[in-house]
Amino acid sequence: MDKMTTILQPDDATFPGMSEPVKPRTARPVRGLSDRTIAWLFVAPTIALLLAINIFPLVWMIRLSFTSLNLSMSYLPLRFVGLDNFTDILTDEDVWFRLQTTAQFVIWSVAFQVVIGFGLALLINRQFRGHSFWTTIILLPMMLSPAVVGNFWTLLLQPQIGPFNYLISLFTGVPPSSFSMTGQVSLAPWTIVLVDTWMWAPYVMLICLAGLRSIPDYIYEAAEVDRASAWRQFWSITLPMTVPFLMLAVLFRAIENFKMFDMVNLLTSGGPGSTTELVSITLKRAAFEKWRTGYSSALAIILFVTVFGAANIYVKALNKVKQR
Amino acid sequence: MTAVLTKSSAHSIVEASPRAKMVAGSLVILYAVITILPLVWIVATAFKSQSDAIAYPPKVFFEPTLEGYVNLFTVRTRQTPDFIAKLPPPETWYDKLVRQRDMVIAGPSKVVPRFVNSLIIGFGSTFLAVFLGTLAAYAFSRFRIPLADDLLFFILSTRMMPPVAVAIPIYLMYRQLNLTDTRLGMILLYTAVNVSLAVWLLKGFIDEIPREYEEAALVDGYTRLQALRKVVLPQAVTGIAATAIFCLIFSWNEYAFAVLLTSGEAQTMPPFIPFIIGEGGQDWPAVAAATTLFVVPIVLFTVLLRKHLLRGITFGAVRK
């Protein structure tokens, strides 16, 4: 298993997540407590809590994924069905379609967020007057509850009364009630991308800004001396030196978007039809509406393995970039 | 602030020209204004009357009213004008406001208990997560722990699970333990989610406190725990505060677990707000009022957290 922590190793000052191995020092023991005991006592409660609330349920879920449990018919005896749930899911065209929908959503949102976020970071990095005030304003959407965001965008996007359609019609002349951002098959997926980008582009911006600030000035000064053009400086200095940060942003956003549930659930709840039904929505429907617990456990495991696997592959790539 | 700016601002050779700065500034301000408009619209909607809120074309100028807030906090029943005329004169301004719409106040709405739930669950889980997180982070930062990297990765990986997926077995487990729809259950759950962030963030903060301080204290005869309490914690206080606010914001904003695992008693604000229904469907001014009240603390925290924001959202992997 490749470790995510490796990307955070401090080969430069920007990744201080981990420090060098600690040189053990012995302190005077407290009432017979050695450092080793203290270390153990301090770490144990956290590990215990995570085992109880994450690992135990996960193991339980693995067990359930081999059963046909349906919570709305839980009087039926627990029947083990082997890999049936998994084969059902993996041969179900609908599920593949949902995965595709999710992948498209992830790709488009992350792409927009990276372009806008990076662009904004480049602009803010010019340190115009009042930039820190405006940066704070831009950061606000990211701090809000996705549920609340989904909810209030529903109001903004109402075809009859919402300001969004009104503005569009002012500029294009299209009658505002003739299109519905959340109710129309052709528009709903883009609406999700739009709102997600509105919310999370600031996140990418913040990470890029950290990347830009980590480039030492003397490199640019040397480039100036060599009379490198602004473009040349961007392509040979700014971009390559921000790439690890960009990749980190992509990693975090892709994981988050892959499991996105809250905002979509409120904005379109997967509709119209199933145009915006991301895997997490399918999972919620199977688990908490159809109560197909065995089936949904299997789906949850497939999801988790996907996120985990993709993240690990990506982290490997990220390490390569960082080692260059 | 100025000191920070001068320190981080570029050397004269690479300093952007005034014109470049102006262009950059205008573009950023334009983006900021567009990005903040939806939020401004919601805050304004909270002060509209029902009919102004659903007027077409959308009203930018309107007569502000507190109806939205009154509707948020009360349950009202519709009565005939005759009935209302026979009532004793209204005692409060909100009584008066409601009666103008041919309604009387029947009682308080559920918003206060939901808000209280958000506060209790938010602060409860934050306290626990920061407490456990500080201990663990200190241990990871200062002691040689076998398999420390693996443990840290394990702690981080619990965050990768989609909430909807973990919600299934947690739902079953909580049903067995009678923790479904209880504040305690939600506090434990949010603590578990927050503790991973807390450990990672706090470890970063504690790593930055020079080890020498403690060593000096140990040489002076302090025990390990005394050194922790008297030397490390005071140094780490800003980091602890920032971590606490991040945990609080997470619990405050969380929706997936809340909507799947609570239905009444322990329900928090996020699953509650979208279902504030008025007479003719969704009561938008009341929803907007709830959103505004809900969002105000977050806005304040964002301003407070500016400096730590990057660390908090990247698990401390990137520092500004």
Image (cartoon, rainbow, N blue to C red):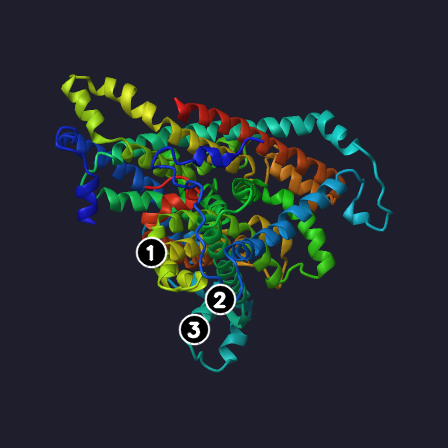
* Residue at mark 3: B96
**Do the residues indicated by labels 2 and 1 lie within the same chain of the protein?**
yes
* Front position among marks 2 and 3: 2
Q: Earlier in the sequence, mark 2 or mark 1?
A: 2
**Do the residues indicated by labels 2 and 3 lie within the same chain of the protein?**
yes
Q: Earlier in the sequence, mark 3 or mark 1?
A: 3
Judged from the image, the secondary structure of the residue bearing numbered disc 2 is helix
Answer yes or no: is residue B195 visible. yes
Q: Quadrant of the C terminus of chain B?
A: top left
Q: Amino acid at mark 1?
A: Tyr
Chain letter, disc 3 residue: B
Q: Amino acid at mark 2?
A: Phe
Residue B213 tag number: 1
* Residue at mark 2: B73
Q: Position of residue B83 (x, y in %)?
A: 54, 76
Quadrant of res A289: top right
Q: Amino acid at mark 3?
A: Lys
Q: Earlier in the sequence, mark 2 or mark 3?
A: 2
Quadrant of res A313: top right
Residue A210 located left or right of residue B50: left
Chain letter, disc 2 residue: B
Judged from the image, the secondary structure of the residue bearing numbered disc 3 is helix
Tally the numbered discs. Answer: 3
Chain letter, disc 1 residue: B
* Front position among marks 3 and 1: 1
